[in-house]
Image (cartoon, rainbow, N blue to C red):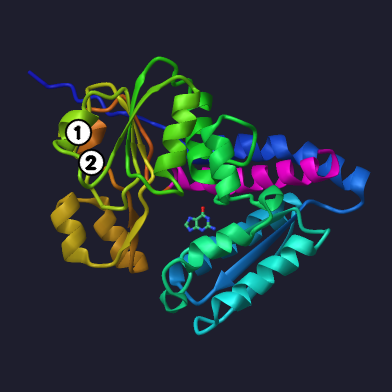
Amino acid sequence: MTTELTEARKLDGKVVAEAIRASLVPRIERFLSSVGRPPGLGIVLAGDDGGSEIYVRNKVQSCEALGVFAELKRVGKESSVDEVLALVEDFNRDDAIDGVLVQSPLPVGMGQGAEQRVFDAIDPKKDVDGFHPVNAGRLAQKRSGMAPGTPSGVIELLDRSGIAIEGRRAVVIGRSDIVGKPMAMLLLHRNATVTICHSRTTDLAAVASEADIVIAAIGRPGFVTRDFVKPGATVIDVGTTRMTNRAEVASLFGQDSPRLEVIERRGATTVGDVHPDVAQVAGALTPVPGGVGPLTIVMLLSNTVHAAERRRDP
Ligand code: GUN
């Protein structure tokens, strides 16, 4: 007798991101022909964090591929917060710039509280990351505004994959301002019953296993194991941790994990918060890479186009 193992349906973020990108094309063309310039995004990058370099390069390339103007301003890792604030002010005043973002994390030398000071300085109308307290507040009140890209992308992925949200139980693991909290708000506004779990939650697996939709956003590789997941549940993996140590990857994912070959070929593998065994329990699952990642950038582009249109036509 054979035991039939059914693998979870894979939710392909690249396909969904492509569909959203295509829907932005006519809006960008309309903006260009009526205003005489493309929508513009200003990016500030401070320091030389390897991950940030890659993210920012992807953001600039994605803008250019779609006909959105992107301007990158950089400062070194020894720079002061005031230098970053001055760049933000330049972008705030620049009429050709509709969206402004400062790549996180800032260099540690800038001190605690630097990031919040910088996000607070961005003109809320240009705040395409949705990190300004005005936009966080507007999101909490379900008023129009700019929601952070990653959680907005997750909602798009669920909607466009035909996964119902209303009335269902959603568990968000992680309470960051960038993903966990806005994710919970967006799910709540879509009438899910939402629980936010975090490092102090007692019996996290038991709480998560009540959920129809699990969102993992804690940045701990393979943390969500099959005992966290109700059979048939949808699992969204927001984690992206770059791992370079072969032995660590083997102990987490097993000696036969295809990730070992990726490390050998490229020197690193990007892993999510969800253990691969979850595929045998979940009904639908996002891969890492290729799940939520592609949506984060396209939602940034969507927010930039939205900000441009609103600045012209408030
Ligand atoms: N660092 C990691 N994710 C993000 C993001 O969405 N926006 C910014 N500005 N920095 C990040």
Mark 2 Cα shell of 10 Å, populated few (<14), some (14-19), many (≥20): many
| Residue 118 x/y as whole percent | 57, 64
Q: Secondary structure at mark 2?
A: loop
Q: Quarter of the image containing the C terminus?
A: top right
Kindly tell me whether mark 2's CB lies below 8 Å from ligand 1. Answer: no
Question: Disc 2 marks which amino acid?
Answer: Val
Q: Pointer 1 and pointer 2: residues touching (CB < 8 Å)?
A: yes
The image's mark for residue 117 is none
Q: Secondary structure at mark 1?
A: helix
The image's mark for residue 228 is 1
Q: Residue at x 17, y 57 (%)?
A: 250
Image side of residue 311 versus residue 176, left or right: right
Kindly tell me whether mark 1's CB lies below 8 Å from ligand 1. Answer: no
Query: Is residue 269 magenta-colored?
Result: no
Q: Is residue 39 above or below residue 82?
A: above
Question: Disc 1 marks which amino acid?
Answer: Phe
- Is residue 97 visible in the rendered image? The answer is yes
Highlighted magenta segment, given as a residue range: 290-314
- Is residue 103 visible in the rendered image? The answer is no
| Residue 148 x/y as whole percent | 54, 45
Q: How much space separates mark 1 and mark 2, taking CA atoms?
A: 6 Å
Query: Is residue 293 magenta-colored?
Result: yes
Q: Is residue 127 above or below residue 236?
A: below
Q: Which residue is mark 2?
A: 224
Q: Residue at x 62, y 34 (%)?
A: 19
